[in-house]
Image (spheres, grey):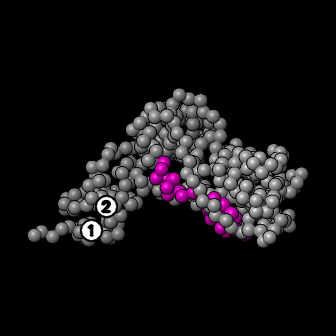
């Protein structure tokens, strides 16, 4: 009886490692050229694998374009998300392309021509928040799934989908929890709440939480400077804004971990101890939250799942183009750290 072909046999034929061959056969990330080489050799050698059969015969081979609205600087957040999108495309044998739209420097015609020439079946949009850009992108008539979105309403008869973290509920919950634990009532939001939908939702979650505990709040108690003109990476700039506040907040709710670290540094410069005299909360659970002193309480979203859900949602949109638009929220996990761990 003829011996069954093994992964080791394929690896020896191609002069590749068994680990690389196994990844290619199981839909994990390897360069596309390597993956195709392994699959062709596996078929040629009649390698009996359910994964190979599934990859080669399962569904259509879609062409997907990942569009980013700017260079993705927050690598701690975006690397696992994009890697997950890549892995899911490779598993399904979809072709994945990437395009960075550089704001006003890139005419939209260049974007639309690229999409047309590519013959993309669907688009994943990351960090695309400009209202005009979104309107034009959606009105190309291609299926689109957005990771996060513009804070402004987009009026169009085209359908699209949005994937985001459960921003509002997460912040609402922690406002109530901190009020219950420490009896605090003065909260301040730090970040440009008009930057994107997620920041807007986090701000709204804080306001709703404050309302639910029966406390008062004024917009003047927040630091909402436009990030187009204000450097949230400069803790001295944040310190200046904190000094302008009429009252020192009990807790700073920050739009993300990067800003939360800046707030902690600004408070340190003002001789305000965190968490003894003020609390700080971030969002996203990236390295800035852990590296900060004190470490920052934050919310984590499963970025790998976020990538998987993005591709699943986009394929559903491709195959059901007339389905109603959807906003899909992914739950978060609270990561409690030193910045809210006041000893009482």
Taking the spot 36% from the left edge, 58% from the top edge, the residue there is 27
- In the picture, residue 262 is in which quadrant? bottom right
Residue 81, relative to residue 275: is it above or below? above
Q: Residue at x 55, y 32 (%)?
A: 136
Position of 209 with respect to 241 (left or right) is: left
Q: Position of residue 224 (x, y in %)?
A: 76, 47
Q: Is residue 215 left or right of residue 99?
A: right
Please report whichever mark, 2 or 1, sits nearer to the chain's N-terminal start. Answer: 1
Question: Residue 82, how many percent across, how many down?
Answer: 50, 54
Instruction: Single out the residue that lies furthest toward the top.
Output: 157
The residue wearing badge 1 is 7
Would you name the residue on which mark 2 appears? 25
Which one is nearer the viewer's eye here, 271 or 323?
323
Say whether residue 305 is magenta: yes
Crowding at dot 2, Cα within 10 Å, few <14 / some 14-19 / many 20+, comes out as: many
Q: Is residue 140 left or right of residue 224?
A: left
Label 1 neighbour load within 10 Å: few <14, some 14-19, many 20+ = some
Which residue is rendered at x = 35% and y = 66% of the image? 20
The magenta segment: 286-310
Q: Outermost residue toward the right? A: 246
Tell me if I can see residue 277 in this picture.
yes
Q: CA distance from mark 2 to mark 1?
A: 9 Å
Q: Is residue 53 positioned above or below 344 on the image? A: above
Q: Are marks 2 and 1 in contact (CB under 8 Å)?
A: yes
Image position of 18 (left or right of 5): right
Residue 290 horizontal/vertical position (percent): 65, 67
């Amino acid at each position: 009886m003829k011996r069954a072909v093994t992964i080791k046999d394929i690896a020896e034929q191609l002069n590749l490692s068994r680990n690389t061959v196994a990844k290619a056969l199981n839909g994990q990330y390897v360069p596309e050229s390597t993956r195709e080489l392994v699959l062709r050799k596996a078929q040629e050698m009649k390698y009996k694998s359910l994964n190979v059969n599934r990859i080669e015969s399962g569904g259509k081979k879609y062409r997907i374009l990942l569009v980013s609205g700017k260079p993705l600087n927050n690598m701690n957040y975006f690397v696992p998300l994009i890697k997950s999108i890549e892995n899911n495309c490779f598993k399904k044998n979809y072709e994945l392309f990437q395009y960075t739209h550089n704001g006003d420097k890139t005419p939209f015609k260049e974007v639309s021509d690229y999409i047309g020439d590519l013959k993309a079946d669907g688009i994943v949009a990351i960090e695309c928040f400009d209202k005009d850009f979104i309107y034009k992108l959606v009105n190309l008539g291609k299926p689109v799934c957005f990771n996060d979105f513009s804070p402004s309403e987009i009026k169009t008869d085209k359908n699209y989908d949005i994937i985001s973290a459960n921003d509002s509920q997460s912040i609402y919950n922690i406002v109530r929890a901190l009020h219950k634990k420490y009896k605090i009532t003065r909260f301040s939001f730090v970040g440009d709440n008009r930057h994107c939908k997620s920041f807007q939702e986090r701000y709204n979650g804080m306001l709703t939480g404050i309302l639910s505990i029966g406390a008062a709040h004024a917009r003047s108690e927040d630091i909402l400077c436009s990030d187009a003109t204000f450097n949230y990476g400069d803790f001295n700039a944040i310190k200046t804004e904190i000094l302008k506040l009429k009252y020192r907040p009990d807790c700073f709710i920050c739009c993300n971990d990067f800003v939360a670290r800046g707030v902690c540094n600004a408070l340190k410069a003002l001789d305000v101890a965190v968490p003894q005299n003020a609390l700080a909360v971030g969002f996203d659970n990236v390295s800035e939250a852990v590296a900060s002193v004190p470490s920052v309480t934050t919310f984590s979203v499963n970025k790998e799942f976020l990538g998987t859900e993005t591709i699943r949602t986009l394929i559903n949109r491709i195959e059901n183009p007339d389905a109603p638009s959807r906003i899909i929220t992914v739950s978060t996990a609270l990561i409690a750290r030193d910045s809210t761990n006041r000893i009482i």
